[in-house]
Image (tube, rainbow, N blue to C red):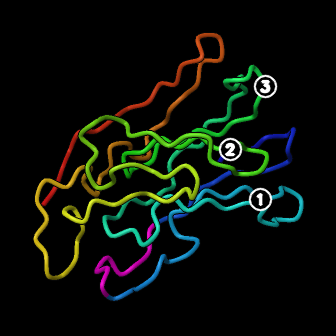
Amino acid sequence: YAYDPGTNLIYFGTGNPAPWNETMRPGDNKWTMTIFGRDADTGEAKFGYQKTPHDEWDYAGVNVMMLSNQKDKDGKDRKLLTHPDRNGIVYTLDRTDGSLVSANKIDDTVNVFKSVDLKTGQPVRDPEYGTRMDHLAKDICPSAMGYHNQGHDSYDPERKLFFMGINHICMD
């Protein structure tokens, strides 16, 4: 969890859907794999951004939420939330409204997604690395352990750098 007294929001991620057999649970499995911003006084959800709709790899999205204040490309100060996810994508949201600012692969070996569409916020899946019952996927990167798991990370506001531990493990 993270808390911003300026917005009075608590930020947290939700885990993966079950059962892992993706053919048994059609649809996006709404509210799983989601970053929430909730009012600290009322608990009301102010926003929810789902990172991995219909997660079929066990990328439980409960990792750290790092808060920072940074200037955007136009020099405007923004309140940001950065979340390195087990799915191999580092997400940055505007923490006042949950809008997606960026979504970048941790490195080029992430192959379950080709990219994340910044307009829709949806990941563009590569079907070769899906876990369908009629398909044996090989070298799925990242593995269920994730490229970033539940380790602790930090942000250095003076250097404007994030520090995080990364795993490079793939799976069949």
Which mark is first along the chain, 2 or 3?
A: 2
Main structural element of the magenta stretch: helix, strand or loop? loop
Q: Which mark is residue 53?
A: none
Q: Is residue 119 left or right of residue 67?
A: left
Q: Which residue is mark 2?
A: 2
**Disc 1: CA contacts within 10 A as few (<14), some (14-19) or many (>=20):** many
- Judge by depth and name the residue closer to the eye, 109 or 146: 109
Compared to residue 90, the image places residue 40 above or below, namely below
**Disc 3: CA contacts within 10 A as few (<14), some (14-19) or many (>=20):** few
Q: Which residue is mark 3?
A: 77
What residue span does the magenta drawing correspond to?
16-23
Q: Residue 30's image quarter? A: bottom right
- Judge by depth and name the residue closer to the eye, 139 or 146: 139
Q: Is residue 53 left or right of residue 118?
A: left
Judging from the image, what secondary structure is the residue with disc 3 in?
Answer: strand
| Real-space Cα separation, disc 3 to disc 1, in angstroms | 22 Å
> Residue at (45%, 82%) from the top-left corner?
27
Q: Residue 60's image quarter? A: bottom left
